[in-house]
Amino acid sequence: MHASVHGAIGVLVNQTVFSITKDIGVSYVVGNSINVPLHIVLDLIGENNYGGKKAMIMAEVFCFILSMYCIYNDHNSLLLFSGWFFSNLPDIIDKKMYFSILFPDRFKYTYYFHWRNQAKINLTNTQTYLLAVIFSLLIFTL
Ligand SMILES: [Zn+2]
C-alpha cells in the first residue's frame, strides 16, 4: 500500500485505541505496536502506481498534506502523527525516507521489512485512487 493508506490506518488505529482506553500513554504503546506489524499485513494488498511516477508523487503529496492538516487540527496531534509515522516506518526505513522512489540509483532499496514481494492482491489504478481518497477522507471524520 501507499503511504497515504498506511498513514491513515495508523492514525485510525491510534485514535481507536485512545477512544477505548482514554489513556494517552497506553495509546502510544499499544497503537504503535499494532501499526508496525499491520504495515507488513497491509502490504499483502499491492497498490498500483496511479498511472506513473509523477502522478503517484502528486497524489501522495496531496494526501500527505491533507492528512497532516487533519492531524494538526486534532487535540491529540502527536499521538495521531505517531500513528502515521509508525504505520509507515517499514517503508521509511526500506525506501530511505522515500528517496529510493525519487532517486532509485542513488538510494538503493533495502529489504529488512520487505524481504519478498508480499502482494497477494493487486489493485488497479482506479482501486488505488479510491483507497487513497477514502482513507484520506476518513481522517476528516475524527
Ligand atoms: Zn511497505
Image (cartoon, rainbow, N blue to C red):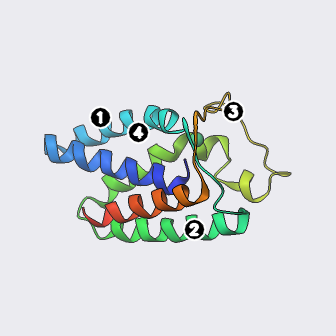
Q: Secondary structure at mark 1?
A: helix
Q: Give the residue at x 47% y 61%.
A: 130
Q: Secondary structure at mark 3?
A: loop
Residue beneath disc 2: 59
The amino acid type found where label 2 is placed reads Ala
Foreground mark, 2 or 4, reads 2
Foreground mark, 4 or 1, reads 4
Q: Which mark is residue 111?
A: 3
Residue 99 horizontal/vertical position (percent):
71, 55
- Nearest the viewer among 117 and 107 is 117
Q: Can you say which quadrant of the picture contains the C terminus?
A: bottom left
Whole-angstrom CA distance, mark 3 to mark 4, is 18 Å
The answer to whether residue 24 is visible is no
Residue beneath disc 1: 30
Q: Earlier in the sequence, mark 3 or mark 4?
A: 4
Q: Earlier in the sequence, mark 4 or mark 1?
A: 1
The amino acid type found where label 1 is placed reads Val
Whole-angstrom CA distance, mark 4 to mark 1, is 9 Å
Q: Which mark is residue 35?
A: 4
Q: Secondary structure at mark 2?
A: helix
